[in-house]
Amino acid sequence: MDTLHTVLRAISGESKSKPQHLTVFREFLAHLEKAARTPAAKPTRAKPARRKPARRGKTT
C-alpha cells in the first residue's frame, strides 16, 4: 500500500495532507479505468509470404 501511495503522489503531484487509503484506492481505480478506455494499439498482422506456383515436371 505504501508503494501505491508513492506512485500516486508522483503522478498527481505533492499534496499537503496525507491521503486516506480509500481515497488513494479510488484514484488508483480511476487511473485503471482511464487506461482501459484508451484504445490499445492493434497488433499488425504479418502478411503471408507469396508462394511460387509448383513446377510441374514434363509428363511423357
Image (tube, rainbow, N blue to C red):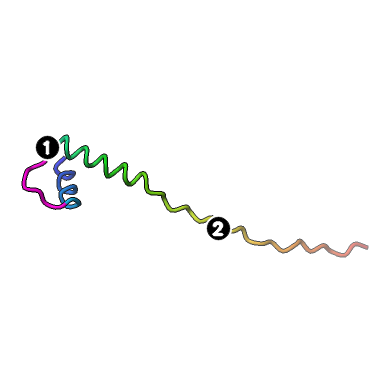
Q: Residues within 10 Å of mark 2 (few under 14, many from 20)?
A: few
Q: Secondary structure beneath disc 1?
A: loop
Q: Residues within 10 Å of mark 1 (few under 14, many from 20)?
A: few
Asked if 34 appears above or below 56 in the picture, the reply is: above
Asked if 37 appears above or below 41 in the picture, the reply is: above
Is 55 magenta? The answer is no
Residue 34 tag number: none
Taking depth in this image into account, of 30 and 42 the one nearest to the observer is 30
**Residue at 37% across, 48% down:** 38
Q: CA distance from mark 1 to mark 2?
A: 49 Å
In the rendered view, does 45 fall on the left or right side of 55?
left
Asked if 24 appears above or below 50 in the picture, the reply is: above
Question: Percent x, y for residue 17?
Answer: 6, 44
| Lower sequence index among marks 1 and 2 | 1
**Residue at 16% across, 37% down:** 23
Of the residues shown, which amino acid type is indicated by label 2?
Ala
Of the residues shown, which amino acid type is indicated by label 1?
Gln
Q: Quadrant of residue 25?
A: top left
Q: Please, what is the dominant secondary structure of the magenta stretch?
A: loop
As drawn, the residue found furthest toward the right would be: 60
Magenta range: 13-20
Q: Quadrant of the C terminus?
A: bottom right
Q: Which residue is mark 1?
A: 20
Taking depth in this image into account, of 6 and 51 the one nearest to the observer is 6
1 vs 2, front mark: 1
Question: Percent x, y for residue 13?
Answer: 15, 52
Taking depth in this image into account, of 31 and 54 the one nearest to the observer is 31
Q: Which residue is mark 2?
A: 46
Q: Quadrant of the N terminus?
A: top left
Is 16 magenta? The answer is yes
